[in-house]
Image (spheres, rainbow, N blue to C red):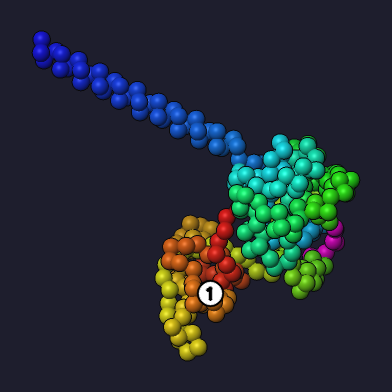
Amino acid sequence: MIFYSKFSIAKAILLLLASFVLALFLATESAQAFNDTSLPNVQLAEVYDKQNVQDYLISEKYDGVRAIWKDRTLQSRSGNIIHAPTWFTEGLPDVWLDGELWYRRGDFEYVVSTVNKDIPVNSEWKNITYMVFDAPNYNADFQSRATFYTSLIQSLHLAHVKAVDQFSLTTNAELSAYLKNYVAEGAEGLMLQKADAKFADGRSSNLLKLKPYMDAEARVLAHLEGKGKYRDKVGAILVLYSNASGSKITFKIGSGFSDEERANPPPIGSVVTFKYHGFTKRGVPRFASYLRMYKPS
């Protein structure tokens, strides 16, 4: 009898534990499902690779923070709420918009600092412009969407909301010339959107980016001591990079740093963005140069 009571108690405890674990699993799954559905639908760009430029509409690539306006909410592409001042969003239409929060060429850090604050600072947001480059829907091609958003944004008469200009070119040689001119004036690069393509979530060749260089992210493994004028400062950083095939590669980045950044380099374990021009035969990014600390939007 005593044995039976102990067995019953143990069984009851096991059943309670099993029920708790199941409830926890279901709650986690439910939360994950909620988070997944709350992510905004966004188009992501592939790299331009000599596609026929006549098939695309072209615009400047603005170096800012991606911002999706939908259901009266401004979100980053990763689904984080962007806490803009009320005056910044109250005049926006009840239409799904996609664009970039931008200040001016070469001031990416200012934009990130401004839009990442939970409590917006009006004086900082006064310098921010919402550069709208799409009004997504699943039925119209981009040519039609570009015409629509341009007319819509112009009708708002809001100084801080602008429609991104789209233009056409006929040859890839013209595209190279335009890129050179835009970059010379401080632009980051160009974007190409396939004119007859309908909106589609994720990355595809319907949307392309063209820069004078490529950029990527890598994790800092070590600081390497400098020599000569960089004595007592960092001469280079050793980083770990994952290439497109998933292979892990370590290499040094020794250029692109200011004197201040050499004195106070990116911390070990942090992620940095670097630029490069193609790859060596070993798959190492060629002519890698430090750009900035990586700041996900």
On screen, residue 227 versus residue 279, left or right, reads: left
Is any atom of residue 1 visible in this view? yes
Judge the density around disc 1: few (<14), some (14-19), many (≥20) Cα neighbours within 10 Å: few
Q: Mainly helix, strand or loop, the magenta region?
A: loop
Residue at disc 1, secondary structure: helix
Q: Nearer the viewer, residue 107 or 192?
A: 107
Image quadrant where residue 140 sits = top right
Q: Residue at x 78, y 69 (%)?
A: 182
Across and down, in percent, residue 262 comes to 51, 77
Q: Is residue 203 above or below residue 247?
A: above
- Residue 12: x and y in percent read 25, 18
Corner quadrant of residue 86: top right
Name the residue located 85 percent from the left edge and 61 percent from the top edge: 170
Q: Position of residue 82 (x, y in %)?
A: 65, 47
Residue lying at the far left in this picture: please name it: 2
Find out whether residue 169 is within the magenta segment.
yes
The magenta segment is: 167-173
Q: How many marks?
A: 1
What residue type is disc 1 on? Answer: Glu
Residue at x 60%, y 37% (from the top left corner): 38
| Position in image of residue 37 (x %, y %) | 59, 35
Q: Residue at x 64, y 41 (%)?
A: 40
Q: Is residue 38 left or right of residue 7?
A: right
Residue wearing tag 1? 261
